[in-house]
Image (spheres, rainbow, N blue to C red):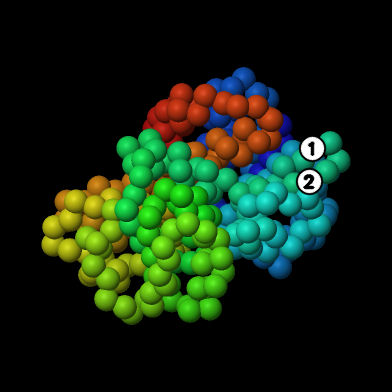
Amino acid sequence: MQAAVLGSPIKHSLSPRLHKAAYEYLGIAGEYTAIDVDSGQLLDFFTNNESNFDYFSLTMPLKEVACTLPVVYDDLPILINSANTLIKKGESWSLHSTDGSGFQSAIEHAGLSSLGSTLILGAGGTARAIAQSLDNRSERIHVIARSANRRASIESTLESAQFNFLSWNDSVDFNNYDLIVNTTPAGAADLMAERVPARTDRMLFDVLYKPWPTVLARKWSDCGGRVINGLELLIYQGIDQISLALERNLDKEALATHLRDVLKS
């Protein structure tokens, strides 16, 4: 197995450690590296290197531009205009997103089965994947973002949930939601920490894992709320990528337990 995570910046990524640990656990010989590739470089990099790899993981800022590559498209990346996985089968490459499925596995592991209301901070590719994955699980999905231009793209991913789009400057009571999900880049949600109620019993899922804890996650925990670390999303979406690459189902929880131990050591 030859694979890599692509993105920029990429030095902070724990994906190589995670995927290598998974290979060892599964008894697979393979290499997995981190390669710095910016959005304007993706097409050339893919064209020049596709014959040398079995799959790629994609992170910021490549999740949207990946949807312009000359490959076979799974339905989900088309719907959410975001992808985090490229898989080679024979001579053909296909594009997928495991952010949503990984997120579902992470909240199920945390004990969340159904939700009355969810607030998502941010409206980029990861936010769209998560919103779509919650469409039949959360009755109401509200999104707060800095740019109103993102409204149509995220609303179009939903069919069932009641949707509302809020401005970054709107007043928001976090205690009105069962789950709050932060999908913004590092530091972008720091000021949101000022809006955390003095006491809360709600759950925050912060998709970031480095630096950790984020300002928002620390304040949330200090106020009594439960926090899910972004490592959970990294683990489960990575397992789904490996499952796609191997074309077989994996014992997801057993592997996730092993990977948690590896990443915490």
Q: Position of residue 196 (x, y in %)?
A: 22, 64
Count of labels in the image = 2
Dot 1 crowding, Cα within 10 Å, few <14, some 14–19, many 20+: few
User: Residue at point 58% right, 55% down?
Assistant: 59
The disc label shown at residue 80, or none: none
Q: Is residue 113 left or right of residue 244?
A: left
Tag 1's secondary structure? strand
Outermost right residue:
91
Residue 52 is drawn in which quadrant?
top right
Q: Quarter holding the C terminus?
A: top left
Vertical position of residue 56 compared to residue 243: above or below: below
Dot 2 crowding, Cα within 10 Å, few <14, some 14–19, many 20+: some
Q: Position of residue 77 (x, y in %)?
A: 65, 55
Residue highlighted by disc 1: 89
CB contact under 8 Å: marks 1 and 2:
yes
Tag 2's secondary structure? strand
**Residue 85 visible, this orientation:** yes
User: Residue at point 41% right, 63% down?
Assistant: 162
Label 1 and label 2: CA atoms lie apart by: 6 Å
Q: Position of residue 216 (x, y in %)?
A: 29, 61
Q: Quarter holding the N terminus?
A: top right
* Amino acid found under the numbered disc labelled 2: Trp
Residue highlighted by disc 2: 93
* Amino acid found under the numbered disc labelled 1: Lys
